[in-house]
Structures are given as C-alpha cells and as structure tokens.
Image (spheres, rainbow, N blue to C red):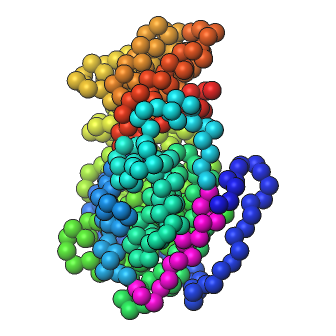
Amino acid sequence: METPIKDGGSTPKRHSRHVSYNRASLTRKSTKGPLEIDDPLSELRPPTSAKDATEATKTALPFSPAIPSTFFPSASLTALEDPVKDFSYLLRPEIYHSLPQADVPTPFRTSHNAPTPETTLPALLSSGHFRPAASLAAALLTGSPSPTAPADIFSLLYVRLACLTLINATSFAAQEVKALEDLSSPFYRHSVRNVHLVPWELRVLAVRLQGIGYGDTRRGVMGYYDLAKDARSELGKAKIQEEKKLWKGRLRDLGVRVASSLVEMGDLAAAGRHLNSLLSTAKGIGDDRLLRGRLGLLYLKIGNLTAAKEYIDPHAETSAEHPYSTTISPLLSMAQGDYSSAVTQLIAIKERSASPDPLVLQNLAVCLIYTGRLVEARPLLESLVSEGHSFPSLIFNLSTIYELCTEKSRGLKMDLIGKLADREGTSIGWESLNADLKL
C-alpha cells in the first residue's frame, strides 16, 4: 500500500507499467457538442440537480451481500462479460491509498455508532459511513479471493472512487482512477457486441477525476464530449421510449457537466454561453427551470447582476413562472449587499412552508449574522443540527457563530462534535471533518 499523496508534496511515485493485455489507445476524433443534434434533444427532461445526484450516489445501492455486483442501473453487466478481457490489473494493491484518520475528530473514531470491522459494504453505504466503505471496497478489490467478473470489479471501483469524493479525498481518487487509463480504448468494448463494458456512471465519474489527476481540466471537457458522442449513438439505436428518455437525460447531464468544468477552469463567460446554448434547445417545451436557476447563480458568481436578475428575480417577466425564483431571489439581494431585504424575503419563504428547506434556513442565519443579529442566527442553525442535518456548510457556519459569540468557542465546538457523533448514521453522511468545525 503506498503512502498517501499529499497536496503540495513531491512528485508522486508513478506506477510501473504492467502488461497491457492488448489494450490500445483509441485515436481521438473530433466530435460535435452534446447538444448539436436537434431532433433527439427536442424533448429533453430537466437535468438532475446536484443534490439529487448526490442522494442517488449514496442511496441507490442494491448490492449483493458479499460484492456489490449489481450496482449500476445502466446495464446488465453480467450479460456483457467478455472472457477475452482480463481486468486483473485493477486489483493491484499499490493502486489504492490508505486513508488518514487525522482529519477526523476523535469523537467520531471512538463513537459507539462507529462501524465494526464486520459491517458489510451495503450497510456502510446506507448508514453514511463513506470512509470505511472506501477502505472496504479497496480491500475487496485487492483481497483474496479477489473478484474476477467485470461487474464486480467496476462496481467496487465505482464505490471506492465515489466514496473518496464524498469524504473530500478527491486527490486520492484522482490518482487511483489513472489505473483505468483510456476508457475510450477498444479494450473496454465487448469483443463481439462492441458494447462498452464499463458502466456509464463510472465512465462519467472517471472523466472528471482523470482531468484532475492529470492536471488538465480541458481533458475532462473533451472526455464529456466523447461520452456525448457515445450517448448520441446509443440514442439513435434506442427502440423503446424509456431508453430514449434515459439517453436524452444523459446528454443533457453531460451538457451541464461541461459547464461545470468550464467554471472549474475559471472560464465563467464560456460557461454562461454554454448554459445559454443548452437553454435555447429547450424552447418550445417551456422553461428549463433547473438550467435557468444555474444560469442565474452563475451570473451572480460572475458579478453580472443585471443578467442574474433576468433569471432569478421573481418580478422579471421571463422568470415569473420559475418555481425556484422565490427561493433563490434572496441571493440577489445578498449579492447587492442588501442583507435586510434578504432577511425579509427568507422569512417570508420560511413562513410559507410547513417544512422549510434547510438551505433556506441556513441562508437566513447567514443574513442575520451580517445584520448583527447573532442571537437569532445561533438557535436557527442549532435547530437544524437537532433535526439531524449536518452538511459541511451548516457545521462551518455554526462554528463561525461560536467563534463570534465567545472566546471559548472550542468547548462549544467539542460539544457539537459529541452531538454529531452520537447520532446514528444516515445515507446523507455521518462524520464531519476538523476543517468543517474550524479546528
């Protein structure tokens, strides 16, 4: 097992090249964009939100008791096994890093709710113990007996990489995903049926991680375009409506991921133009509400408040039917520095709902902080924790309030850690990191 690679350290040790098993790199061809075919994309469904995507990653895990061989809904992998292909090169122990525990607060490591070594992988995932799940997935990949079926190998590898991403260990995932090399190679296609053997979900995740691992975000953008070419091909072959709907949704998702990569590259103007091009394809079927929300938030990030107002201001003509406008319109007031107006808007949203969105309540608490109303902001965030919420920004903001309220904030933070560690795990996640608590 290699020593974990730390950011800013020396150049990581390269894995020695092993037998290639007749793998050959596929020469990259020029491709059209994900949305440059009109007819198949004229009735696109709205893309899955980031929150929904995270929930799906954490919960949609119908694993078998021992090895999660049926994780992916995208294909029946057992039917795609190819006896000619040998994927044992993915089982080498030196690929996978040991995970440090120093960034996990002690109460989480000693809690009675911490998983035991006998806990199965499905149980770890369903209870939000993603760090032990990542370690167990690597152990199953490299242990004895090791999996031999592609379905088992790719399923475990996806669990490993996804869990590393969820515990903020993306740097490790970006190094480990390099073992897959070029997923567009003919080696990863069935030797007879020419069907890709790697599940779609793993291919999409690998594109971003390989871009990070090789320090080339543009590689990720091109990878998404390659996937879009395959998706368009599968869409053309689809016979039944459900399958067509699936591939249309994947095309739209890839388009949004391209915009996300452009934002990561810092090219916000290009990201805006790209999202606008996606939005234009939805004309005739009503506003694509999620895209409009993303565009509004992107323009807020750029600082173009006039453009942002067009998409998120509930009084603007083009966004009057936008159901998320009233939810995110307070962000426009916040961007203009008018926190008092934002407080008024958020309180109105809170009172209209029997169970307000936790993010709305958190934004209200943040605005209360900026208006000097710490006494009101603190119980608001503490109530969210009491209700079982523990997402990183909530814990970070509550820790900030503790620092503003008293010089002995460490004691309050430790009490908060104790409350979090005493909770039973959920599929949303269990442990918090020292960085979340500003320790």
Which of the image's four quarters has the C terminus? top right
Which of the image's four quarters has the N terminus? bottom right
Residue 278, percent across and down?
A: 41, 58
Instruction: Report the residue that reaches farthest toward the right.
Output: 10
Residue 85, percent across and down?
A: 47, 85
Residue 432, percent across and down?
A: 51, 34
Residue 153 seen in the figure: yes
Residue at 28% in and 37% down: 323
Residue at 59% in and 8% down: 406
Task: Specify the segment rendered in magenta.
Answer: 82-97
Left or right? Give the position of 2 relative to 250. right
Residue 103, percent across and down?
A: 61, 37
Residue 198 seen in the figure: no
Q: How many marks?
A: 0
| 299 or 1: nearer the viewer | 1
Left or right? Give the position of 334 relative to 35. right
Image position of 313 with respect to 415: above or below:
below
Image position of 195 with respect to 422: above or below:
below
Q: Does residue 87 show up magenta in the picture?
A: yes
| 373 or 186: nearer the viewer | 186
Residue at 52% in and 29% down: 107
Left or right? Give the position of 302 relative to 331. right
Left or right? Give the position of 301 relative to 236. right
Rendered image quadrant of residue 27: bottom right
Residue at 30% in and 39% down: 322
Q: Does residue 421 show up magenta in the picture?
A: no
Rendered image quadrant of residue 80: bottom left
